[in-house]
Image: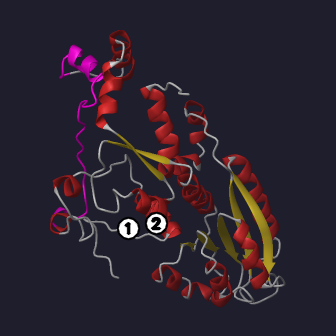
Amino acid sequence: MSHAITRRELLGAAAAAGGTLLAAHLASRPAFAAEEAAWPKLPLPPVKIYKVYAGRTGQFYMARPTEEIAKFEKYFADLEQKLGNVKFIGGDQIPPTDVAQVAAKMAEADAAILIHLSGHGGDAPVLGKLIAVGLPTAVFAEPFGGHGWMYFPQWHKDRKKVVLLPTTDWAEIDRVVGLMRVPVWLRQTRILSVGTPKGTAAACSAEAIKKLLGAELVVIPNTRIMEAMQAVDPKAAEAEAEDYWISQAKEIIEPKRQEIIETSTSPIACRTQFTTQVKDARRMFLNWGADVIQGDVMTLLHRVVFYGDYMQPVADLADLMGLKVIEEGGPAVAG
């Protein structure tokens, strides 16, 4: 049994499922709600995030107010309603709850968020036991909640799956919670490779991709693509070219109209060229590949590109997944 799918539907599905980073990041922004109706609805499971309040509150030295817990509870309830595909569970406070009991219960979650309220029972050794569970974890630590913040960066240096949020901006929670959905959604994702995969050995390995990202690599032979393209109705191709490209263009200098229409029935369509700026072009030249990407021209030259400045979300997502970001044209990174 087969189900026909248009190219527009395929691209839309890829944006919603394969483009998990962009989708998760945008969906945490208020403006995204108005645009969401145009995205295909996929049966993505809700992401379960275990919340923990660490440290005593109230009269203790440099502790957050006790009533702040109720404010957080309301904030999480509102955020769950706004995003629609996350579910906050847990809500234990340490102490009085034993940290070992909380760590055991966290196993039922996909991710965790730790609210640091004070160092009185919520210091780094206590939180470290929760981070050791291995879930993608965010630690939200507002200033004046003790001196524990000095020890938190060590988790980052040790490549733990943790994002540190030492800020008073609660909107940062929204942003990181949006990213926490990505590892779960990746396990529901298929990566379509047209023809033989190109790149590093790991990037071409279905087993390595599955182990690292949880996604399934599906290779579509070029012959199958050619057959599908040749079967396209010329009138349908012209209609799509008019709707998708020609009518949307501010001005067409080249190619000619007929050539644009013909690309609708060709797997080799118009190439898109990008112009970008980097912090240090010479450093990028000297550090091309960063001793990580090695191989032939296809491996070294062709890269995945996304629109917009998403360096911070990419860095945070890497922290949540235990990965490392290397910026070829950026500043030197120790370690």
Residue density around tag 1, few if under 14, some if 14–19, many if 20 or more, within 10 Å = few
**What amino acid is at disc 2?**
Ala
Dividing the picture into quadrants, the one containing residue 122 is bottom right
Camera sees residue 50: yes
Q: Is residue 3 left or right of residue 103?
A: left
Q: Quadrant of the C terminus?
A: bottom left
Dot 1 lies on which element? loop
Q: Is residue 150 left or right of residue 219?
A: right
Residue topped by disc 2: 318
Q: Residue at x 64, y 41 (%)?
A: 43
Q: CA distance from mark 2 to mark 1?
A: 7 Å
Residue topped by disc 1: 325
Residue density around tag 2, few if under 14, some if 14–19, many if 20 or more, within 10 Å = some
Give the residues in magenta: 253-282
| Residue 300 location (% of width, % of height) | 20, 58
**What amino acid is at disc 1?**
Val
Image: 280 above or below 332: above
Image: 5 above or below 99: above
Image: 113 above or below 15: below
Q: Are marks 2 and 1 in contact (CB under 8 Å)?
A: yes
Q: Main secondary structure of the magenta part?
A: loop
Dot 2 lies on which element? helix
Q: Is residue 117 magenta?
A: no
Q: Residue at x 49, y 29 (%)?
A: 9
Pick the front one: 4 or 317: 4
Pick the front one: 295 or 99: 295
Pick the front one: 250 or 223: 223
Q: Residue at x 53, y 26 (%)?
A: 3
